Image (cartoon, helix red, strand yellow):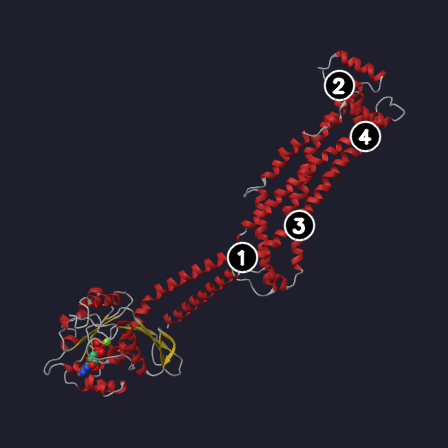
Amino acid sequence: MINQSSGKSSVLESIVGRDFLPRGSGIVTRRPLVLQLHKTDGGAEYAEFLHAPKKKFPEFAAVRQEIADETDRITGKTKQISNVPIHLSIFSPNVVDLTLIDLPGLTKVAVEGQPESIVEDIEMMVRSYVEKPNCIILAISPANQDIATSDAIKLSREVDPSGERTFGVITKLDLMDKGTNALDVLEGRAYKLQHPWVGIVNRSQADINKNVDMMAARRKEVEYFESSPEYGHLAHKMGAEYLAKLLSKHLETVIRQRIPSIIALINKTIDELNAELDRIGRPVGEDGGAQLYTILEMCRAFDRIFREHLEGGRPGGDRIYGVFDHQLPAALKKLPFDRHLSTSNVKKVISEADGYQPHLIAPEQGYRRLIDGSLGFFKGPAEASVDAVHSILKELVRKSLAETQELKRFPSLQSDIAAAANEALDRFRDESRKTVSRLVEMESSYLTVEFFRKLQTEPEKLPAKESKESQAQAQAASNVDRYSDNHLRRIGKYQITRLFNSVDKLFSNTIPKAVVFCQVREAKRSLLNHFYSQIGRREKEQLGKMLDEDPALMGKRETIAKRLELYKSARDEIDAVAWK
Ligand code: GDP
Ligand code: MG
């Protein structure tokens, strides 16, 4: 910046060392020019515009024309200005990586063809750039104007009161009236800034018209200062080349100062990216070993959650206890023994068992048949318990899978584990069914001698509420008629029912034990054992398929990983520079 026609564009060109900006009298720069310098490893210099990305400009004269044309494209061939920047990149081995911004100069009055608001418009635009605390301000004022009234200095003082990022530049020293000089300013007496003032002699309009090139202009400038009676003693601190060096030194200092905070910021970003990667899951290694490891990790994570559901910590396992505590006893209570042990059925079974020869003391065969027939009833509740626990376990598998965050990224593996777990539960259920039905069969296969002994003493043990009379009757009847109703009722209602009551108690203990042993304990111990032995034998390719991921997630991870790499290498580079 800043004052119009003060030589801003000319200074910028000198710093870059190339002719490429439109310069001249009046308001030439009418749009901000954001100039990015990219240092290349060699090769020819060229320029590129953001608005024409495919086009390379090897000729800098063409660059100047394009800037002028592009300015007109937005503003028309008027004297209007626009705050829409033109982005120009210069690729050259002779530049440093740096972004420079050339702005329209501040004016005091609108000239013909300009809107009244132009004075404020320009000021606002310039302000929006120089306000940024990271920006270095080149406050350029021509020597043939009063520095005290320089708008450039006024504005920079406003946005940078301490002056630590303002560089005062005086141009057009060659155009000063004879007998006057700018020593008061250049030596910091007239207006003190933190950084030393730099005097510049750019090419005059006549030089431009004569196409004096940059190198010749620089030589001329050096000559001017060295031979100047007024500025000779300052010659080594004047000129565009010195200004460029001063700026790059300053940049270096600023960057060095900022390194700790930049490193801190980079480290923070690295931490954030790492956390994000952890959240969506790290990439899986390419080799089979790493894949197998990942699969086993996932299985273990799932298994851990599943066990928490069973053992407590997560809900669900208590429902298994509910089966044993409510469902099984209720079902046992509902068994239709009344019908089976009704007098008429008892009579039927006993007489069929006795055949043509009625029993004498106890209907042994009849007992066996009655007991055999009724014990079968217990199979129902027993198997119902097996199935109820089975479906609870299945539900817990489903829940655990859904709660295993790590598995979310591998839908194939998730369904593989689900299949393996369910298959294992099916096996456990089959085993459990066999076991409980064997328990029931065991009970009916052998009636102990003890049982028959007890039967003999049964009549005396009739409940007290049965009247003496009916006891006596029963006693008599047992001697007289083996098939009297009383006799049969005693067999059905008291003897066998008593047996069943004790069997009932036994089963409500042993069935849960069998179910826990066969299903719950196995699920806890070896739910995925079979799966483990299977995948252990699988080829790398099959393992890879199990680890199929959602493509969107993979893309996201790749992006984050790339950014992470970038930040890490940035940190390394900065570290290397900082310790130089
Ligand atoms: P801007 O409007 O601030 O960008 O200024 P320019 O760089 O376009 O320059 C305006 C005019 O002043 C051009 O004709 C330049 O040749 C001329 N000019 C700039 N600096 C100097 C200088 O130091 N000495 C002389 N003699 N002319 C200069
Ligand atoms: Mg300009």
Quote the CA–CA distance across marks 4 and 2.
24 Å
In the orientation shown, which residue stands out farthest toward the left?
A: 179
* Marks 4,3: beta carbons within 8 A: no
Quote the CA–CA distance across marks 3 and 1.
23 Å
10 Å neighbourhood of mark 2: few (<14), some, or many (≥20)?
Answer: few
Q: Is residue 541 above or below residue 21?
A: above
Nearer the observer, 465 or 548: 548
Q: Which residue is mark 1?
A: 409
Nearer the observer, 271 or 306: 306
Kind of residue at disc 4: Arg
Tell me residue 401's x, y (percent).
Answer: 57, 50
Q: Which residue is mark 2?
A: 461
Q: Quadrant of ligand 1?
A: bottom left
10 Å neighbourhood of mark 3: few (<14), some, or many (≥20)?
Answer: some
Quote the CA–CA distance across marks 4 and 3.
39 Å
Kind of residue at disc 1: Arg
Q: Which residue is mark 3?
A: 423
The kind of secondary structure element at disc 1 is helix
In the orientation shown, which residue stands out farthest toward the top?
A: 469
Q: Is residue 237 above or below residue 568?
A: below
The kind of secondary structure element at disc 2 is helix
Q: Earlier in the sequence, mark 1 or mark 4?
A: 4
Q: Which residue is mark 4?
A: 369
